């Protein structure tokens, strides 16, 4: 039996992914969730900083994902997100700079709003760095 | 006009033509860039709308303060809210520069039409509009500084943060946006209500778009589940939707501006060409006349 289902990942800048896959694991706001074919229809909010793992032909690939939501239908899955990047696409220097900037902001006593924003930015930067370094030597 | 004057005039028109020609080329390349961006953002934007509609269809009971006009997130007392006057907010998207035909003028005119005599808080994107409204003494948010050039998702994110923030805190209860839409090669000034969500209009819009594309029809699954909850998903979706919308509006306005400038500069260049032709003809006539005169003077002198 065909275990594959159709996956489409869209960002405002491009179509990140489109194709038939075996399984995906996404970080949503409540934790990581795995989707196989025939999953119950679901709509979920994606975490501010997380990963998107895609299994195709027995091979896993991991990408950085930030924000947006996922819509699971009977036959297909659609992910809409503001940013999705493969490890090799991650701009390490930029993420490093973003991390330092966010840390600096967190050190200063700022308003709650700014604190939350900086915290989210820091999380994104750390996640990007983590994914990038994990696949650096591959 | 003497020969010298005309020659000077031709030279100056040539210089101007060089500038308009260069501006035309710049706008043409920027327009191409904008068109690519526009093509990329479309599927995303379309999908967001379909999903929104999907959710609304499945869960008719979603009560979000994004839909309900009278409720604000941090204001639970409804009665008090209803008595409050409407605090409208209008976002106007203009260009940073002139020299683009009626582009800026059309947007500003439309914005003034909407404002009427009411007190409306204005957020202006683009220098031309900002200067105009400040000069006219409108209530312009001076901290809202975004350029119309080079629209990015970051800028769109910040803009949507600003408006969502204002909306959530009850600083405003209606946010609309005036911009220029680009459809094919036709430009139109459009007004869109961003918040609260215009459900009916929105439903119509989503279904209208679906007709054009196949296989994208909404499948109604009654047992759709929402993780973690309908409200939470909806509340994530709305900012994402607004962000996508603002981004696509910025891209559209950017494309329109450059298209308008392209046309205006193309017109200016061809006018300059016409003028150069006319002036060259006149110059030759004057030159011919002066030569004829000289010859007749010489002949007259010789025959004495």
Image: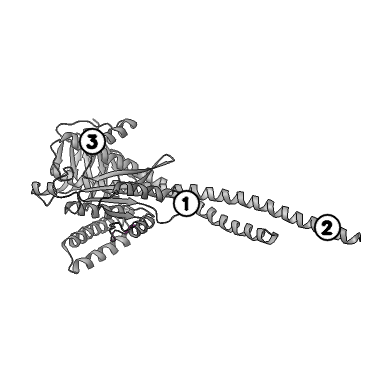
Q: Look at the image and tell me in which quarter the N terminus of chain B lies.
A: bottom right
3 vs 1, front mark: 3
Q: CA distance from mark 3 to mark 1?
A: 37 Å
- Outermost residue, bottom direction? A108
Q: Which residues are magenta?
A: B142-146
Q: Residue at x 25, y 50 (%)?
A: B118
Q: Of B238 and A101, which appears nearest the observer?
A: B238
Q: CA distance from mark 2 to mark 3?
A: 83 Å
Residue B116, percent from left and from top: 29, 48
Q: Quadrant of residue B17?
A: bottom right
For label 3, the residue is B200
- Residue B143 is covered by the magenta coloring: yes
Secondary structure at badge 3 equals helix
Secondary structure at badge 1 equals helix
Q: Chain of mark 1?
A: B
Q: Residue at x 18, y 66 (%)?
A: A110
Closer to the chain start, of discs 3 and 1, is: 1
Q: Chain of mark 2?
A: B
Q: Is residue A105 visible?
A: yes
Q: Is residue A85 visible?
A: no
Provide the major secondary structure of the magenta segment: loop
For label 1, the residue is B27
Q: Residue at x 31, y 44 (%)?
A: B191
For label 2, the residue is B295
How dense is the environment of label 2, judged by Cα within 10 Å: few (below 14), some, or many (20 and up)? few
- Whether residue B259 is situated above or below residue A97 in the rendered picture: above
Q: Chain of mark 3?
A: B
Residue A80, percent from left and from top: 26, 44
């Amino acid at each position: 039996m065909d275990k594959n289902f159709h996956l489409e990942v869209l960002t405002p800048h491009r179509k990140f992914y489109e194709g038939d896959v075996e399984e995906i694991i996404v970080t949503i706001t409540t934790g990581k969730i795995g989707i196989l074919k025939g999953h119950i229809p679901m709509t979920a909010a994606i975490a501010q900083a997380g990963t998107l793992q895609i299994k195709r032909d027995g091979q896993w690939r991991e990408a950085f994902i930030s924000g947006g939501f996922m819509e699971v239908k009977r036959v297909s899955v659609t992910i809409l997100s503001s940013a999705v990047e493969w490890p090799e696409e991650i701009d390490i220097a930029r993420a490093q700079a973003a991390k330092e900037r966010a840390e600096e902001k967190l050190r200063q006593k700022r308003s709650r709003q700014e604190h939350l924003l900086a915290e989210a930015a820091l999380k994104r930067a750390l996640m990007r760095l983590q994914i990038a370094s994990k696949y650096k030597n591959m | 006009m003497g020969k010298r004057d005309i020659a000077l005039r031709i030279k100056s028109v040539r210089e101007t033509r060089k500038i308009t020609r260069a501006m035309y080329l710049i706008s043409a390349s920027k327009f191409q860039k904008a068109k690519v961006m526009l093509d990329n953002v479309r599927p995303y934007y379309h999908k967001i709308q379909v999903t929104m509609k999907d959710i609304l269809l499945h869960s008719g009971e979603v009560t979000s303060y994004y839909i309900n006009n009278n409720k604000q997130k941090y204001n639970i007392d409804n009665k008090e809210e209803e008595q409050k006057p409407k605090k409208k907010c209008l976002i106007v998207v203009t260009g940073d520069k002139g020299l683009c035909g009626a582009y800026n003028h059309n947007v500003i005119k439309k914005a003034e039409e909407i404002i009427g005599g009411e007190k409306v808080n204005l957020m202006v994107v683009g220098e031309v509009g900002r200067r105009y409204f400040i000069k006219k003494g409108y209530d312009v948010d001076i901290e809202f500084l975004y350029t119309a050039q080079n629209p990015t998702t970051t800028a769109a994110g910040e803009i949507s943060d600003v408006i969502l923030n204002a909306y959530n805190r009850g600083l405003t209860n209606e946010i609309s946006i005036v911009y220029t839409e680009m459809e094919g090669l036709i430009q139109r000034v459009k007004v869109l209500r961003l918040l609260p969500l215009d459900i009916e209009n929105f439903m119509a819009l989503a279904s209208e778009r679906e007709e054009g594309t196949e296989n994208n029809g909404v499948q109604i699954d009654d047992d759709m589940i929402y993780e973690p909850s309908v409200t939470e998903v909806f509340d994530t979706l709305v900012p994402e939707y607004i962000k996508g919308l603002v981004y696509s509006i910025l891209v559209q306005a950017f494309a329109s501006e450059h298209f308008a400038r392209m046309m205006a500069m193309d017109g200016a260049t061809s006018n300059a060409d016409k003028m150069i032709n006319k002036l060259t003809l006149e110059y030759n006539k004057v030159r011919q006349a002066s030569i004829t005169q000289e010859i007749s003077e010489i002949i007259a002198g010789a025959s004495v």
